[in-house]
Image (cartoon, rainbow, N blue to C red):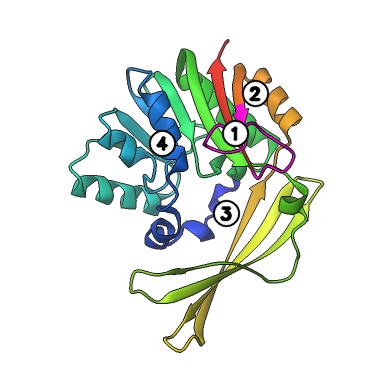
Amino acid sequence: MNQNTNFEEYEDPILYDIENDPFQDDVAFLKKWAKKVNGPIIDFACGTGRATIPLAQAGHTLMGVDFHHGMITQAKKKAEKMNLRIEWIQGDCTKIQLKVKSPLIYSVGNSFQHFLTNEEQDQFLTTVHQHLEDEGIFIFGTRFPSLDELLQPTTEEYWRSYKDETGREIDVFTISSYDSIVQIQHYTTIRKLKDDSGKTISEKKTNIQLRYVFPQEMNRLLKERGFEVLAVYKDWNETPLTQDSYQMVYVCKKIS
């Protein structure tokens, strides 16, 4: 897989948590579905357990799978501090074979975009299908390929600011370039650390590639891999998909 060369954004799991832990909309959505099932729930591309851990805290049995050693290690540390029993597995989500069938599998954090080729997408969905019970549910989110999303300026653009673990402010900028032939967005993220006077004292650049899939393309892809699309939303609040969406949230059922 291309995952090995697409890891710069994940080399600092603590920074990843600082930037991503505040987002919980998908967790609330997943909890509603988790209440409907019995048996182990699988979190593919679980990262540091941002969604895995809250579901385990709610009393569900969880398995978290991720390719990245550092992310899995951080997830284990967090779960151990909370005395949570979660099975963490480091492995390739396109090839892994777990000795379990699940009634509910999910993949959040736009992880689907890390499968950059048609073959990787097929392999991942086949893995999900193989690990689902009959009529099991698969939930995942991916960015919507809107014009605003794809045709971002290729110059350095301000994105957001936040404070790190020491309370210092960090400004985040991005540079993006979309390759429409392979449907991949090339992102450079620049994090600028500021001192108390607001002066930039250091900066760090990371690169990542993300694959975009259009709605009709996704519908056919899921059908070919044995899934029925039950719903598609523009967000985790179950808002219907529209042309001005920035997200696609899929709820699918294994049918064959």
Mark 3 closeness class: few <14, some 14–19, many ≥20 residues within 10 Å: some
Question: Of circles 4 and 2, which is in front?
Answer: 4
**Amino acid bearing label 4:** Ala
**Amino acid bearing label 2:** Leu
The N terminus sits in image quarter: top right
| Residue 147 circle label | none
| Residue 28 circle label | 4
Cα–Cα span, label 4 and label 2: 24 Å
**Amino acid bearing label 3:** Asn
Which residue: 68% across, 19% down? 224
Whether residue 12 appears in this view of the structure is yes
Locate residue 243, reporting x and y percent: 74, 39
Mark 1 closeness class: few <14, some 14–19, many ≥20 residues within 10 Å: few
> What secondary structure is found at the residue carrying circle 1?
loop
Q: Which residue is mark 1?
A: 239
Span shown in magenta = 232-246
Which residue: 60% across, 23% down? 231
Q: Which residue is mark 2?
A: 222
Question: Of circles 3 and 1, which is in front?
Answer: 1
Taking the image as shown, residue 129 lies to the left or right of residue 69, namely: right
**Amino acid bearing label 1:** Thr
CB under 8 Å between discs 1 and 4: no
Front residue of 175 and 182: 175
Q: Which residue is mark 3?
A: 6
